Amino acid sequence: MIIATFNVENLFERPRAMNFPTWRMGQGAIDAAGELNALINKRVYRDADKRRMLHLLRKHRLLTARPNNPLLELRKVRGQLFECTPKPRIVANGRESWAGWVELKTEPLADDAITNTARVIAEVNPDILVLVEVESRPAVQHFHDKVLRPLLQQPYPYNMVIDGNDERGIDVGILSRYPIQRMRSHINDAKGESRIFSRDCPEYYIELPSGRELLLLPNHFASKGSDATGKRRRLQAAAVRSIYESLSKRYPYAAVAGDFNDDPESAALAPLLRHTNLRDAMALRQYRGAFPGTYQRATVREKIDYLLLSPALRKHVQAVDVCRKGFYAPRKWESFENINQANKDRFQASDHHCLWAALDV
């Protein structure tokens, strides 16, 4: 059996603000959308709220009848948020005064990029795959049926995505050749008034051919763009630790996998990496790869994707590796033949690589 994790960076559509060469280039729009929606959702708009909304709407060119912001769109269903004459002002007095929101504009990904994503998965051929940054379960099903299935000898009869807390449509999900028996979401786990998980930490219970159940906890922690200090990632790591430890005695076959957005030495990930009995597959002797990272050029600091295995699972590990063919780095490894210097930004499968472990269970 092969278990893998792969941040596919969306299958068909991706927010334009997340499609720049660096996260900083689109982070302002992402932050503005989050702040505006938080203000919009208030029951009562105070004067300070109105001033802040007006400032953000003006800054991001959303105050005109036909806004021309390429990254953000103001959706209005009913009522009116603002008027522009004689001068711009917020006329709504709270959430009940109007219906609408701010959303990130999306754009379709290039066909070759989607195909290369499928080629990476087919190359690894996992039996259970954690997918990070997927839009929805229908998108995963469509990707499987139309793009991935023709490359496989054995399809994936089971898939699932639970909509999480991220309004941008970047959720975690799974593809599986084995039945998903039960699932539970943690989207409402909170500390104070704030939800803990940026996306979710779903529990998936998968029936293995042996009759044993595998507990799988997919994750995608807060990015350094939105959590520069790592405070939220540390909170998320501690929460995953708590979930895992509450279940590990009943489910000794357990794995935590996904994009943790930080390197193994970070203090943010310490609750999960250094204070549990879980171990990352790449830290095992069975990993004989030449590079320590899982992102872009695979340096030590670019180790941000993880496949953490419980002691019972580690006993069965036969091999560990990383498929890097979907990313162009010709001085380090061989990529797919249709990715080159001229088109790499358009046709790469993902900035992330697919980490996998083969187990004899």
Image (tube, helix red, strand yellow):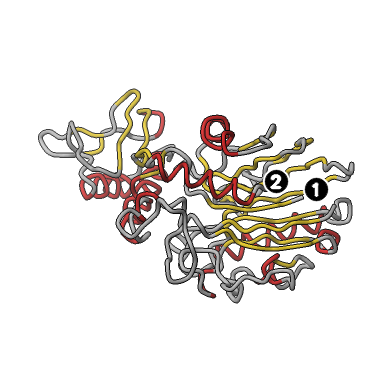
Within the image, what quadrant is residue 360 found in? Answer: bottom right
Query: In this image, 69 relative to 193: left or right?
Result: left
User: What residue is at 85 percent from the left and 63 percent from the top?
Assistant: 315
Within the image, what quadrant is residue 266 found in? Answer: bottom right
User: What residue is at 58 percent from the left and 56 percent from the top?
Assistant: 354
Disc 2 marks which residue?
Answer: 128
User: What residue is at 66 percent from the left and 56 percent from the top?
Assistant: 257
Nearer the observer, 242 or 3: 3
| Contact flag, marks 2 and 1 (Cβ < 8 Å) | yes
Most distant residue in the front direction? 337
Query: In this image, 94 relative to 233: left or right?
Result: left
Disc 1 marks which residue?
Answer: 214
Q: Where in the figure is residue 304, as x and y percent of width and height?
A: 56, 65
Amino acid on which disc 2 is placed: Ile
Q: What numbered label is drawn on residue 249?
A: none
Mark 2 vs 1, N-terminal side: 2
Amino acid on which disc 1 is placed: Leu
- 58 relative to 278, above or below: above
The 10 Å Cα crowd at callout 2, few under 14, some 14 to 19, many 20 or more, is many
Q: Where in the figure is residue 52, as x and y percent of width and height?
A: 29, 50
Nearer the observer, 206 or 154: 154
Nearer the observer, 267 or 353: 353
User: What residue is at 70 percent from the left and 46 percent from the top?
Assistant: 128
Rounded to the nearest angstrom, the CA distance separating label 2 from label 1 is 10 Å
Q: Secondary structure at mark 1?
A: strand
The 10 Å Cα crowd at callout 1, few under 14, some 14 to 19, many 20 or more, is some
